[in-house]
Every structure is written in structure tokens, then in C-alpha cells.
Image (tube, rainbow, N blue to C red):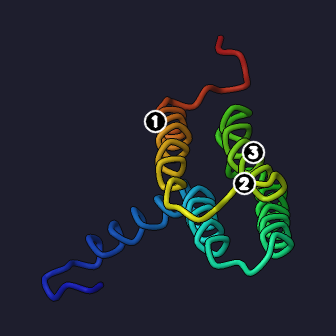
Amino acid sequence: MNYSSDTPGAARQRNNRFATFTARWHYSLVMLAAHLGVFHAWMYAPSRTAIVVIGVFVCAALVLYMLLVPHYFANGMDRLAHGMVILDLLLEALLPVIHDHYGFYLCAVAFAAIVGWHRAWVLSRPAVSDTPQE
């Protein structure tokens, strides 16, 4: 979005903030969208087999992407928290659970709160250098 009163520096700063936001949160937002999308797809899935196939495919894609962007995660706990969301999705796909209601929104809110707050807290802390200070 360009504003007529913007200076080039202000526009660049706004673009940098958006780039920083997407660099810090893109995987978490993709995972949230995948989580909600999968549950909506399961509500209309014609068979149990379709639920399993959709769930395993989406989980495999999320794990593959998780392996392709290891620098995204702030620390091991951040990686573990994202992995737990994927594990939940996989268990929901494999275990015989009825997916005909909207209770998954509460689960998504809980995951977003836990993973999001932890990630925001870790990213807000100052970076610790690996080299000892003299």
C-alpha cells in the first residue's frame, strides 16, 4: 500500500516491518491455517480413509517444511511446540474421532496462545552471544 504523503524512507520502513513480521511468524501462521483448514476439510470428508489421507499428507508437508527451514525456530522449545501441534493433527487423523463440530477452534486458540506467546517471548529477549565476553 503506497501513501501519497510517504517519504521513501517511511515506505521502506513499513516494508521492512512487514518483512520482519513475515520472517518471524510465517511458519506459525501457515500451521494455524493448515490446522483450521484440515479440520474444516474433515467435516465434509466422505470417509474415514479420506480423513487419514488428508491428515497424513498435511502433517508430512508441515514436517518437511519444518525440516527445510531450521533457522526459523528460535530455540528447541519453539521447535518442540510446533512439533506438538503437528503431532496433535496426526493423532486426530489416525485415531477414530468424530470431526463434525467446531470444537477445534478452541484447540486452535489454545495452540496459538501457547506457541505464539512462547515464540513472542523468546523473540523479544536479547540475543545471547555464543562467544564468552572478556
Look at the numbered disc 2 and give the secondary structure of its residue.
Answer: loop
Horizontal and vertical percent position of residue 129: 65, 26
Instruction: Tell me the amino acid under the disc marked 1.
Output: Ser
Of the residues tagged 3 and 1, which is closer to the observer?
3
Could you give the CA–CA distance between mark 3 and mark 1, rounded to whole angstroms?
A: 21 Å
Q: Where does the C terminus fall, quadrant-wise? A: top right
Sequence-earlier tag: 2 or 3: 3
Q: Which numbered disc covers residue 97?
A: 2
Look at the numbered disc 1 and give the secondary structure of its residue.
Answer: helix
Horizontal and vertical percent position of residue 28: 59, 55
Sequence-earlier tag: 3 or 1: 3
Of the residues tagged 2 and 3, which is closer to the observer?
2
Instruction: Tell me the amino acid under the disc marked 3.
Output: Gly
Say if mark 2 contacts mark 3, CB within 8 Å.
no
| Neighbourhood count class around disc 3 (C-alpha, 10 Å): few under 14, some 14–19, many 20 upward | some
Q: Residue at x 67, y 71 (%)?
A: 42
Q: Which numbered disc covers residue 83?
A: 3
Horizontal and vertical percent position of residue 33: 56, 67
Instruction: Tell me the amino acid under the disc marked 2.
Output: Val
Say if mark 3 contacts mark 1, CB within 8 Å.
no
Between 70 and 114, the one nearer to me in the picture: 114
Q: Which numbered disc covers residue 124?
A: 1
